Amino acid sequence: MKPGELFVEAGAGEAAAPSPLADRMRPRTFDEFVGQRDLLAPGRPLRQAIERDALQSIILWGPPGTGKTTVGRLIAAATCARFIAFSAVLSGIREIKAVMAEAEDARRKLGRRTIVFIDELHRFNKAQQDAFLPRVEAGDITLVGATTENPSFEVNAALLSRSRVFVLEPLGEDDVREVLERALRDADRGLGGRKLTVSTEALTAIARHANGDARVALNLLELAAALAEPNQGAPDSSPPRPIDTVLLADVIKRRALLYDKDGEEHFNLMSALHKSMRNSDPDASVYWLARMLEAGEDPLYVARRLVRFASEDIGLADSHALSVAVAAKEAVHFIGMPEGNTALAQAAIYLAAAPKSNAVYTAYASAAADAHERVAEPVPLHLRNAPTRLMRSLDYGKGYRYAHDEPDAVTAMECLPAGLQGRRYYQPTERGHEREVGQRMAKREKLKQQREKP
């Protein structure tokens, strides 16, 4: 594939097959874009930078179907710069170096910058990524990378430091429904001319099964629409078969989509698993886990919920709980399914049997409330770093007490701002390891009070 062909529209010839529904319904303007409001709502920095053609190098990080490539298309439509698109799957180092040389010439001879969009940036190896770096540093190109993988691990540190990372979140269920409903209404690009009847339950089921991926949702809707068409030999006036949960069962052959007619079982089962673990019931926990996994639930979704539970409902009552949950997530990611089901079961049973405490959860919630609602007091001078003479002359770091100089590594120094001194966010319970944590905190407080005396 030649550079720039990533966004070339299909169907130029007479016999060209129609493009998939997901491609036809791809947003053409920001007004058509669904989701990512924090990034692309009117007035947001990323949208303003694109609309004003003042974009700097960025990396778009998010799961499939969240709009990364669509943002690339919107940039291509808005910019006056040269725009070149690469696919990391199909482009080699030779093509990269050639385009980089052209970008350098365009800027130096014509004064024209080049925007380079790289789809699946994480698939480029170190040598390929290094080829972009000099041109980014020189200002010859503006890099726009799209990746489904964590840029911290998959993008060269030097390239990452010169780019701003924007995180695209999975679409919410309501967003996916909006995408589906728009496709059903649109007679030009979508399915609006097919006279389809789609039940509310089916639409909700598709949206839930897509798991935040608009492309998956539209592909499933398109397949369901094809199966709904009248059989060959039927009268031309025969209406399409209604798209309901029965037809969808034929489409995907999985129970994950059809938990029940109301489409609520996805959340019901997750709630049952969470509350069974919170109630320290290993048997119920492994049962609800099996119900979810055997129905086809995304195992990484389950793993994420286990990781959250480990901190929210156990915390320091068992400091190993978070490690067990994260290890299960890594095991599922490494070996996949169905082999990963026992790793998740091991974690669920461990978390259910562990002592429970929500002290970490409530501590953070209380601290976050103060951070939002109270005056943002400056960091006390004695806690500030003082790397320069000017800072030291302004009393940065003055009065700091080095804890290791004390016999028990405890000083009387206050570390909260003046207006919050005396606040206690973390209140350990008497359960599990938190009993010991609470004892250490009480000992620290006693020592601190003793050292406050003359």
Image: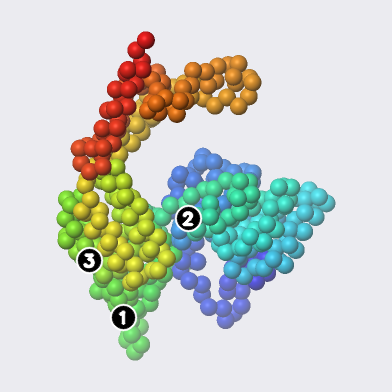
Image quadrant for the C terminus?
Answer: top left
Whether residues under marks 3 and 2 lie with C-beta atoms below 8 angstroms apart, the answer is no
Residue 316 position, x and y percent, is: 29, 42
Mark 3 or mark 1, whichever is nearer to me = 3
Identify the residue shown where x is 36% and y is 33%: 368
Q: Is residue 321 above or below residue 244?
A: above
Amino acid tagged 2 = Gly
| Occupied quadrant, residue 360 | top left
Where is residue 315? Give x, y as percent: 29, 44
Is 180 placed left or right of 316 in the picture?
right
**Which residue of the protein is positioned furthest toward the bottom in this rendering?**
233
Earlier sequence position, callout 3 versus callout 2: 2
C-alpha span from label 1 to label 2: 43 Å
Identify the residue under disc 3.
291
Local SS, label 3: helix
Residue 235 picture quarter = bottom left
Q: CA distance from mark 3 to mark 1?
A: 40 Å
Q: Earlier in the sequence, mark 3 or mark 1?
A: 1
| Mark 1 or mark 2: whose residue is earlier in sequence | 2
- Callout 1 secondary element: loop
Return the residue nearer the eye: 139 or 53.
139
> Which circle, 3 or 2, is nearer the viewer?
3
Report if the CB atoms under discs 1 and 2 are less than 8 Å apart.
no
Residue 60 visible in rendering: no
Q: Which residue is mark 1?
A: 238
Q: Label 3, label 2: how many angstroms apart (C-alpha)? A: 28 Å
SS under mark 2:
loop
